[in-house]
Structure formats: structure tokens, C-alpha cells
Image (cartoon, rainbow, N blue to C red):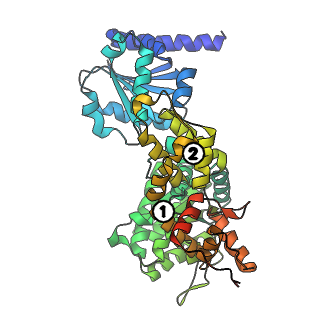
Amino acid sequence: MSAIGNTNLVVLQECFDDFVRQWPEWAEVRGRLQRAGLDVTSARELNTGDKRSSWILLALPSKALHQAFDLAPEVLVLCAPWEIAQVNDIKRLEETFRRELRVDQGFALVIVQDTSAQARLGATIPEARRYIFVTRDRLQTEPDPQALLREMLRNELGGRRLFDNRRPATGPQFFGRAREFEALERDVRLGHCLGLYGLRKVGKTSLLRRLAGKFRQHEGTNTRVIPVELDLLAVDYKQRTNAGLIAGLRKAADEEAINARIEAPRAVSDHHGRILQLFEAAGRLGARWLFIVDEFESLLDGRFTLSDGIELLSWMRGVAQMHPERFSFVLAGRNRRLLAPARMGRIDNPMYRFLREVPLAGMADEECRTMVRRLGRRMGLAFSADALDVIMRETGGHPSLVRTLGDLVDQSVPLAARNPAQVDAAALARHLPRFGREVDDDMRELVQAAEDIEPRALERLKHLAHRVPWIGGDLEARIDDALERYGILDAQAHAFRIDRFAAWLRANYRAPVTAAHG
């Protein structure tokens, strides 16, 4: 072993000796974890300076555990020896999750003395993560610690319904999008103002939140970006005015400035003026601001007054043009045609030919397969290659459709059968009828989206679904181009990317007749 390796072992042993001096009855924990398949590599106090403290251990899972449950390179273990479990321990552990990027973000193993710890602390545990509780007595008296840990992982992770993720995907729930993420980050750092367009539930919000998270960590190049996120669907009804939105942006920008340690002059009461103050303060540090406005359609489709929506967009464009080195923005939503015309009623459209368009379709083939395999493996489900083929054909890689089908499979397999349970194409096919019923509303949404993309799109789709020739020339090409950008059609085959949508159209619309469309 190298000198560095020996040094690390000495430091670990010294730290663990400190732990044992505080809690002598816990001396066997490290050895029991090792027998379970977790090799402790680091130990540190949660509350340094106190006579006694809870401790956090970092552990490497064995190769067998890693493969069986798709674990990250390291696992967090909390040792909480108190007679009554402490809420602060959970808060400190969550801070560790944010710092330690190599640890498995999906769960923590919590070894406790308090037999009621899970009930006592349950309300403080974030929904996105599973805390697996085990008492020290059980860990130390269990004849087979490895079987115990596997059983706990199978029951806790297997019962989580990881496919059923209805909120924007974050942390361990976020998969793929490497190419789209890289392109989006590059354009933002270059100062472009962007329009991110895509179908509902295709992953726009998830992608933008991940981007904002990276910028907050100040990862990547030396170009620092400070993000401010505004979800228009979450804006209170009373704030749905231009003044209310500017006030909300100002408040969010002040909070981001504090987090980014941007020292700005004393705040002025004028919201526009305060935002410009923050831009200038960041500019002195070589940083730039990014406003992310999600669900931009709300500004233009009647949920806000049109004049207020246009006023906000005009202000953002004006600031971006006056301060291109300090400010840019992203508008995210489904219907790009709302921003396409030169005029909106009698008012000039401030976004006319101003945004760089970024279409977002379904996930790339291999990224989607990886997501299904990894989520399945974590829950004790092994999807075969032919099962993945079926999933890709039915869903086209649309994340929400993929997760809906995966969740149907998950619900049908009892925990006791997950060792792991094999899921092949035949097993998957048994769920397709119910899948069709579950996604009926999604298919109607696709029709609405297609018509928003291009008014004649539905006619084109009916012809394709029923294999009726369409004679359309340039119109056909224009419609196909738009539908391919949104991932409704396959750009390579000029056919449906989502087979389930084609089947739904055949079931709900009569076959059209061959006719010239111009």
C-alpha cells in the first residue's frame, strides 16, 4: 500500500477512535458495516466542539451492492447514538448531501439508539430522499449484516415508486440531457437570450433547474452566472401584474445576491432601479445575471393582462440590449407561436426575432434506456433489452410517458419477487392496454400542442397515422420540420416518434381522404 493510502487509514482510525471514545458501546459499528458491504472511508463529528456528537461516516459500497441497487460511489451513514433522536442531525446531514457530490443522493443509512427515531423525525425528512433507519442493537446482533442491508435497501428503495415522479426531476431523479445541457449552458455563458420550447412534461423545468443549480455552485468556466428563477404558474393571483412580477424578481434577485455574496449599494425603493444596482454590482466582479421565466405563455394567453405581459417582456429585452455583458434571460414554455408574430394585437412584439430558439424533444435513445435501467435496478427490476425496445417505441423517449409505463410495471411486482425481478418484452406488453388508458389525456395534449405548433398539423398527423398519402409540397415539409423539433415525429424516418400517439390517433379519428394540401 502507498504512503498516502497508509496515511488515510491512520487518519480514519484516529477519527473512529475519537468516535469510540465518545460512544464506547458503538465500537463494533464499523466492523458490522464492513460485513454488510459498506467499507467506511471517512468519519467526522456533526457538532465539533461538543463533548459528545452524532457522527457522519462515508462508506464505499461493495461491487455487488453497487450493481444490485445502482448505488453511487459513496454512501452516507449517520450514527445518532442519542436516547432521543435529534432533528438537527437531519439538517446537518442534508447540508452534507449538498456538499458531497459523490455520495448517493437517494438515501442515507441512519443508525440510531432511539427506537422511535423514524416516527419522531419523519416530518423533517425531505420527500426526495429515503432515510433508512436501523437500531444499533439490531445491526450488532444480526447474524448476517449483509442480508439485513440488502433487505432494507430492497424494501425501502423498491417501495419508492421512483418512476412516479410528477414534479420536475432533480438530483438522482435527473437523467441524461448531456447534449442539451451543454448547448444551453454555452449559450447562456455567451450572453444569448433564449426561448426553450417543448411539449408539456418533456423536461424543460428540470433542465433549467439543473442549470441554475450548477450556476449557483459556480461550477464550470470562470464566467460566473447568477440565476433568478420565476415560475409564472406559481405567481399569486394578486401579483399577476407587471408591477407584481417586477417586485417578485427584485426580491428573488436580492436573495440570490446574498447567496452569491454580491455586495450591492444600499437598496433603493424602486424595483427596476434596485435590479440595475445588482447588475452593476455583479458586473464589477465579472459576473452576469440570468433570469429564467418558466411557463411564459401565462403572460400572453389571458392569465395576465396582455399589456402587463408585453410590458415585462419589453423591459427584459431593453435591459438585455443595454447591458448585454451583465444580463440575459430564458423564456421556457410550449407554444413558440405566441412569440412568433411581429405584433400582438396593436402592440409590437418585443420578442419578435429576438430569441435564439432551443427546441427540446424526448430523451436520446441511450440516455432514456439508461434512465429506465438505473431506476429499475434501484428498485429490484431488471429490464431486458427487448423490453427497453418496446418502451422506446411506445414513448419516443418522452420522459413523462416513459415514467408512466415504468410505474405500471413497478406497481405490478411484489417486493418479495425483486431479487431482482426480470422484466422482458412479454411482461411489458401486458401493461400496454392500461398504459394507453393512463395516457389518454397526454395524447389529447399532444394534439393541442401539434395545433399550436402548426394549425394544419393535426390533418398531417391523421394522414400519417392512417398511412393515407398527403400531397402538400412545402407545407408538408414545414409541418414535418416543426413536429420533428418537438419530438412528435422522428427526424430520420419522417414517421411517428411516439407509436402510442399514432395508435391513439387511429382510434380517435377516421381515416382522411387523399387530397392536395397547399
| Position above or below: 353 against 266 | below
Q: Is residue 324 visible?
A: no
Residue 442's disc number: 1
Q: Residue at x 50, y 64 (%)?
A: 443
Q: Nearer the viewer, residue 159 or 257?
A: 159
Residue tagged by mark 2? Answer: 175
| Mark closer to the observer (2, 1) | 1
The answer to whether residue 455 is visible is yes
**Dot 2: within a 10 Å radius of its alpha carbon, few (fewer than 14), some, or many (20 or more) residues?**
many
Q: Residue at x 53, y 75 (%)?
A: 313
Where residue 347 appears, x then y in whole percent? 54, 87
Residue 120 drawn above or below residue 7: below
Query: Measured from the top left, where is residue 480 in percent x and y?
Result: 69, 70
Q: Secondary structure at mark 2?
A: loop
Mark before the other along the chain sequence, 2 or 1: 2
Residue nearest the observer in this picture, 128 or 472: 472
* Mark 2 and mark 1: Cα distance apart in space: 21 Å
**Which residue is depicted at the point 44% across and 70% down?**
246
x then y, percent, for residue 257: 48, 54
Q: Residue drawn 34% across and 26% down?
A: 133
